[in-house]
Image (tube, rainbow, N blue to C red):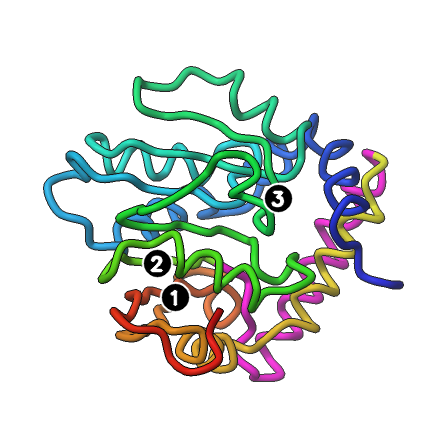
Amino acid sequence: MTLLRDKELATAFDHAARSYDTLVAANPGYHSHLRRSARRLGLPHDGAGLRVLDLGCGTGASTAALARVLPGAAITAVDASAGMLERAAAKPWRPGVTFVHAPAERLAEAGVDGHFDAVFAAYLFRNAADPDGVLATVRNLLAPGGRLAVHEYTLSGRAGHRAVWNAVCGGAVLPVATALGDGRLYRHLRRSVVEFDTAGEFAARLRAAGFDRVRVLPLPGWQTGITHTFVATRQHTAPTGVR
């Protein structure tokens, strides 16, 4: 199977939007892990007066995590899937939370511009056709010293963790998704994790993209060694080669 990209992937997410919240609710720790990653941004004073970009917000689970952890922040939530974004925007939100329909690669065209104090990206980079290009965009949107938190399925590199991922997908996620008519998308998601960076490789990618103070933090439960939070800070000057 060829991995889905760009418009084809957005269309698949459009179709899956109607059942997405139900599926993720069956994942133990899904929402609490997002809140943990949001806290790991380490923003002061509940985010009061700060601008935060939620990149790849989906149906709003990551946005809800940010809104709860950072009740004082202005949050701009962006997604390439119109169907997912419609679901997100229809939920009740406090003032200061706004939604924008745009691919991560074309934020400027949608009027999303910096400088943000922090960027949060959940389950985004392994779905990007050009993750380095998206990282360059993120870096340019951040204020100097701004913080990035990436919450992502990134395997540790150990065979046991890869086996757990494949077992959970094959035994639980894919049968349900296929019954709902979204098997193609979830087959993509399974493969995208296996073929993407390990946790160590993604940390190195962040450093090469102009981020420092990079930390790789595990998440508990069955996702240990499978899902990580990456926390980093934008360097004040870009390294050679960074756009």
Q: Are marks 2 and 1 in contact (CB under 8 Å)?
A: yes
Return the x and y of residue 145 as percentages of the image width and height: 22, 62
Task: Give the Cα distance between marks 1 and 3.
Answer: 21 Å
Residue at 31%, 23% in the rendered image: 96
Q: Secondary structure at mark 1?
A: strand
Q: Which residue is mark 3?
A: 103
Q: Are marks 1 and 3 in contact (CB under 8 Å)?
A: no
Task: Give the Cα distance between marks 3 and 2.
Answer: 18 Å
| Amino acid type of the residue tagged 1 in the rendering | Phe
Is 229 magenta? The answer is no
Task: Magenta stretch: give its range.
Answer: 152-180
Residue 148 marker: 2
| Amino acid type of the residue tagged 2 in the rendering | Leu
Q: Earlier in the sequence, mark 2 or mark 1?
A: 2
Q: Is residue 186 left or right of residue 144?
A: right
For the residue pair 117 and 172, the one nearer the viewer reads as 117
Please state which of the two labelled residues, at mark 2 or mark 1, is closer to the viewer: 2
Residue at 71%, 56% in the rendered image: 189
Q: In terms of image quadrants, where is residue 109?
A: top right
Packing grade of label 3 (10 A; few <14, some 14-19, many >=20) is: many
Q: Earlier in the sequence, mark 1 or mark 3?
A: 3
Task: Give the Cα distance between marks 2 and 1.
Answer: 8 Å
Q: Which residue is mark 1?
A: 230
Q: Secondary structure at mark 2?
A: strand
| Amino acid type of the residue tagged 3 in the rendering | Pro
